[in-house]
Amino acid sequence: MRRRDEVLVGLFTTVAIIILALASIWLVRGGLNRGYLLYSRYAWGAGIKQGSPVWLVGVTVGAVDKVDLDPRGTLVVTYRIAREHRVPVGTVATIVPNGFFGDMAVAFTPAAPNPVSHEPGDTIPIGVPSSGLQQVLQRADTLTGALSIMMGALRTQLVDSGGIREMRRAAVAMNRLLGTFNQVAEVQSRELQATLVALRSRVNAVDSARLDSTVRIMQSSATSMQAFAAELQTASTRFNTLLIKVDSGDGSLAKLMNDPALYNDLRRIATRVDSLVADLMANPRKYLKFSVF
Amino acid sequence: MQRASLRFLRRMAALGIAIFAGIGKRAYFLVSATAALWKEPRTYFPMVIPHMKSIGVDSLVLTGIVAAFIGSVIALQTRYQLFPGVQLSVVGLIVRQSIVLELGPLLTGLVLTGRVGARMTAEIGTMRVTEQIDALETLAYDPMAYLIVPRLIAATLMLPILVIFADFIGVGVAFFTAILATDVTWADFEAGLRIAFNLFQIFYSLLKATIFGGAIAFFCSYEGYVTDVGAEGVGRSTARAVVMTSVAILVLDAFIAALFAPRLQG
C-alpha cells in the first residue's frame, strides 16, 4: 500500500512536471524543434521581444529567440526559424504590429521568389517599417484630444454660458412664429379657395354666345372710337391752326382779341347802344312814328 | 446610558483581545509546527507520501472536472463577448490569462478547501475529541510532527502540482471548446496563447498555489487541533475551518496580485 502510494505520487508529480516543461517550451518557443538561426539589426526601441512571431509572407515560420542590446545603438535580434522553412535571398525584415495589444511581430518580405535561400547564421536586412497600429493609435489619440477640447469649448459655450437655454428659447419663439404663419396660411388658403370657387362659378355662368356678341360690339365700338379720335385729332389740328392765326393777329377776331382800342371801341359802341335802347324804350314816339291812317 | 457605553466598550475590548489571542495562538501553532519540521523529520517523513496521495492524486479528478468546465465556459463567454473587429486570437489570450493567473490556482484552492481541508479538520478534531492526541503525547510522539507537519508539507507540495494539471486541463478544454463550438481556429487560439507570454506567469500561478496549499493545511489543521469537546465541536471546527480558509485564500490572492501583478506583463 505504501509502495503504491509512493509510485502514484511520483508518477503524478513527474507527469505534472513534464506537462509544465513542455507547455512552457511550447508557449515560449513553439516546440522542441531547435530550427536554425538568422539575425537582424534594428534601431533601439523597435518594440520587438523574445517570443514574438516571425512571419514569412504571412506564414509563421519561427519566433524571435533572443534580443541583445548593442550599446552602439542597435538591437541584435536572433530569429529561430523552423527547419522546413527557407528564407529566400532578397528578403527584408520589418517589425509590424501584431494585434490590438501593442505586440509586435517580424515580417519577412521577399523581393521576388528566389530558389537561393539564406544560410543559417545569415543577417536579414531590415526594411522600411510600414505605418503601423501604433501610429494609427497615436493619431486617434490626437484626434480624441482635439475632440475633447472642442467638446470642452462647446460645453463652456452651450452649458456654462447658458447657450442651450438661449437656443431653447429661440426654438420656442420660432415654433410660436411658425404657428402664427400656419394660422395665416390656413386663413389665406381658405379665402383663396373660396375665391377660386366663386371664380369657377362665374366662369361657368358666362354665356359664350353673348360674350361673343359683346366682344364684337366692343370691337365695333373700338373702331368707332378710333374714327372719332381721328376726327377729334383733325378738329384739334384745325383749332390749333385757328388759334395760331388768332395769336398772329390776322383777321377781325385776332384784332378784336389782340387790339385793346378796338375792344374799347366796341365797349363804347355797346354802351351807346344800351343807352339808345333805353331811350327808345322810354320815348318810343321819339323814334317811331306810326300812323295807320 | 453610561452603563450601556461601558458594556459596549467592555465587549469591544473582549473582542479585540479574542482576535489578538487567536492570532497569537495561530502564530504559536505555526512556530511549533516549524520547530517540529526542523526537529522531527523521522516522525513526519514517512507520513508525507500518504498525505500527498490523499491531497494530490485523489483530488485530481475533482480538480480536473472543475478546471475543464471553467475552461469551457471562459472560451465560450470570451468568444461571444467580443465585439466585431477584434481578432479571434484574443480568445486564446484571455483563456490563458484567466486560467493560469487566476482561476486555476483560486478554484483549485477553494475546491481543495472543501475536499481536503474539511477532512483534515475532521480527522484531527476527532483525534482531539477521542484523546488520541493526548495518547500520542503519552507515547512521546510530537503530535505536531506526526499530524500537522506532514499535512503542511503534502498540501504545500501538491497544490502546485494540481494547479499544473488544472491549468493544462482548463486551457486544453477551452482550446477544444473554442475550436469545436465557435468560429475560432486552431491558429487563432494558438497565436493568442503565445501573445505576451512570459515564464513568470507560470511561476506566479505556482507561487499562488503553494501559498494556498500552505494556508489550507495550516488553517484546517489548526481548527482540528483546537477542537472543542464533543462531536458538535468537530462539526463546528470543520465549518469554521472551511470558512476561514476560503476567506484566507481570497485575501492572499488579492495580496499576491497586488504584489506581483506589475511583473506579469509579457
Image (cartoon, rainbow, N blue to C red):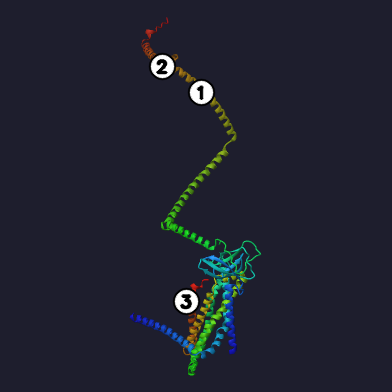
Q: Please report, as a chain letter, where disc 2 is located.
A: A
Given residues A289 and B95, the one toward you in this image is B95
Between the C-alphas of marks 1 and 3, the distance is 124 Å
According to the picture, the residue beneath numbered tag 1 turns out to be A233
Amino acid type indicated by mark 3 = Phe
Q: Earlier in the sequence, mark 2 or mark 1?
A: 1
Question: Do we see residue B181 in this rendering?
Answer: no
Residue extending farthest left: B2
Q: Amino acid at mark 1?
A: Gln
Q: Where is residue A204 shown, x and y percent of the image?
A: 57, 39
Which is more foreground, mark 1 or mark 3?
3
In this figure, which residue is indicated by the disc labeled 3?
B255
- Quadrant location of the N terminus of chain B in the rendered image: bottom left
On the same chain: label 1 and label 3?
no
Q: Secondary structure at mark 3?
A: helix
Counting from the top left corner in percent of width and height, residue B100 is at 54, 75
Residue contact between numbered discs 1 and 3, judged by CB atoms under 8 Å: no
Q: What is the distance, in whole Å, between disc 2 and disc 3 at their CAs?
A: 138 Å
**Residues beneath discs 2 and 1 located on the same chain:** yes
Q: Which mark is residue A258?
A: 2
Establish whether labels 2 and 3 are both on one chain.
Answer: no
Position above or below: A30 against A165: below
Give whichever of A208, A111 is nearer the camera: A111
Please state which of residues A3 and A111 is positioned toward the viewer in this rendering: A111
Question: Which residue is most to the front?
Answer: A72
**Looking at the image, can residue A195 be seen?**
yes
Q: Nearer the viewer, residue B237 or B219?
A: B219
- Compared with A54, A222 (above or below) is above
Label 1 element class: helix
